[in-house]
Amino acid sequence: MTDQNNNDSSIANSSDPAADRRQQLAALIPEAFSEGRLDVAALKRALGGEAIIEGGERYALTWAGKGNAYKVLQTPSTATLRPQRDLSVNFDEAQHVFIEGENLEVLKVLQKAYFGEVKLIYIDPPYNTGSDSFIYPDRFQESKEDYLRRINDLADDGTLMREGFFRKNSKESGQYHSNWLSMMLPRLYIARNLLREDGVIFVSCDDNEVHNLRLLMNEVFGESNFVGAVIWKNVTDNNPTNIATEHEYILVFARNKESIEREWKSSVSDVKDILVKIGQELTSKYQGASLDAAYQDWFRDNKSQLWPLDRYKYIDMGGVYTGSQSVHNPGREGYRYDVIHPSTGKPCKQPLMGYRFPKETMNTLLDSKRILFGEDETKIIELKVYAHEFEEKLSSVFELDGRLGAYDLREDFPELTKAFTNPKPVRLLTGFFPFLLKNDGDIVVDFFAGSATTGAAVLALNKKDGVQRKFVLVQLPEPCDEQSEAFREGYSNIAKISRERIRRVIGRQHKDADLLTTSTASNGFKSFLLTPSNFKQWRGDGIDTPEQLAEQMQMFAKSEKDGAAVEHILYELLLKFGQKLTTPVEILDVADGIVFAIKQRKMLFVLETFTEAMIQPMVEMKPREIIVIDGVFHDSDPLKSNLDLQCRDSGIKFTCI
């Protein structure tokens, strides 16, 4: 790639995480670098000797193959993402993205375009139960090049080949935990790069690796950025051995804990909606004692499904309410005054630390009948709070029947009785997504998409409140067992099921015009496939003679591969130039030539044909940059030079690839 300012032949490579971090360090401590290389002695002087650990014992997480995992992380990818219009829904307008491909390579490809752009990452990686199959270096003497060659093994059509791709990580393996950690480390590092400064990552796991995962995430994100652990009670163990295991974990880390909100609250709750609806139904039919009796019957039958709002036990003409809201002042001395019991006429017992409201606020609450009294003054008063006023906090304990995930999936795939083992329920994710994803354009990424529960949850939330959240899902085309029901129904791999679920959820929403407005981001998704680059790779390792060098240079007379589709090249360049996959693209007819424009015509791409007549109209658009692939000039150096000169005169950056 050449332009008026620099020469760069790395268009087919993704960002180099190690190089990026060296640049960040150089910007922060320039005196630690000499002639572009790190001077360790100078770095020690800049940081102070007491801040440096040299040899000796220290606290650290280590395992067999950790060094190799870092090498895999630091090696740029030469892959790209190919758009799949035929597998997408409303491709040109869609703001959601589904990507089929090996997730580490996909993360590397996305890194430049999505660096610091993601609000929330949720992943449900393999739990390392001893029966999981996933990609990892199964031989630790294997070189970095061999490993990368294996995970980049691509068929002629660009799809990932199956043979040798997965390894069952048996507990009998000598590197059982090491294999899993080597798989997770590079993915978590790149995931951190994608997060916004106020971004957060949620990772599901169980007892098999929760201890190692916590230590690994301490290393990647920094121990100070640990937000907390959610305990998900998801099952009742009726056949326990020593201790009945009835829970899983979700570990939560921030990119920068100082940048996130001090308190997370959400007014979005499926249970809240249920209580508000039943309140409206019953108050329209009953009143007085009949209303209370009808609600008590309903509450008794449904209590098990109402957590964490199962304390909302009462109803009046204002709706369902709870009487267990405390008036105590938390932590320190509050307000002191008497509240007179309406029946006994005596002052009610005060909370230990006093009331949390001043007397004027209490008088207002009493006048509006929002205070609940006991039978006499010996009971501390309580605050009446209606279900429609509920704001939820994100609790460290979450109770939800894990079987709901299978029920959700069956609703979308009635023809499949068991496509996944223990898929996550949509309600699990809609239970905590609203705490983080509150604004239009907030992006959630899931690179272990599995059954696409993350996509279904985002679509459900967008339908509920109209906020235009966006998702990016990544799923490996892990093959389905040929004897499985899914395979017999035409789903040869997991990615096909994931993508089809998103399609069906969107289709179901579109059938109900009252529930889906055109203002939401739920109107489609763009599908992409991980493939080799559309540009040729320079191979210098096999050149031994001048003739071989001349032959290699002749092959690079044009940079793009023969037969590369224009749209495929366009999306590869969008990623390389730091543009998201959902960037709107305008197709312009300029002097009988096609020009692709983005960012209100601030960036122009010429990828098909180019003529002298196109120069002036393009320059008059006053773009910031014009990007052209070399092949459109058909070896005409004067034509290329003329465009270059016109761009220089107009202050436009010209890039030729």
Image (cartoon, helix red, strand yellow):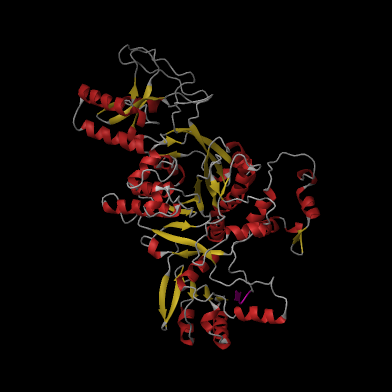
Q: Quadrant of residue 519?
A: bottom left
The quarter of the rendered structure image containing the C terminus is: bottom right
For residue 142, say whether it is visible: yes
For residue 580, say whether it is visible: no
Span highlighted in magenta in the image? 1-5
Q: In this view, does 390 lie above or below 347?
A: below
Q: Indicate yes or no whether the magenta region holds residue 3.
A: yes
Q: How far across and how far down the image is residue 324, in percent? A: 38, 24
Q: Is residue 195 above or below residue 584?
A: above
Q: How far across and how far down the image is residue 225, in percent? A: 59, 42
Q: In this view, does 200 lie to the left or right of 459?
A: right
Q: Indicate yes or no whether the magenta region holds residue 340.
A: no
Q: How far across and how far down the image is residue 57, in percent? A: 77, 39
Magenta residues, dominant SS class = loop
Nearest to the observer: residue 254 or residue 147: 147
Q: Is residue 608 left or right of residue 35?
A: left
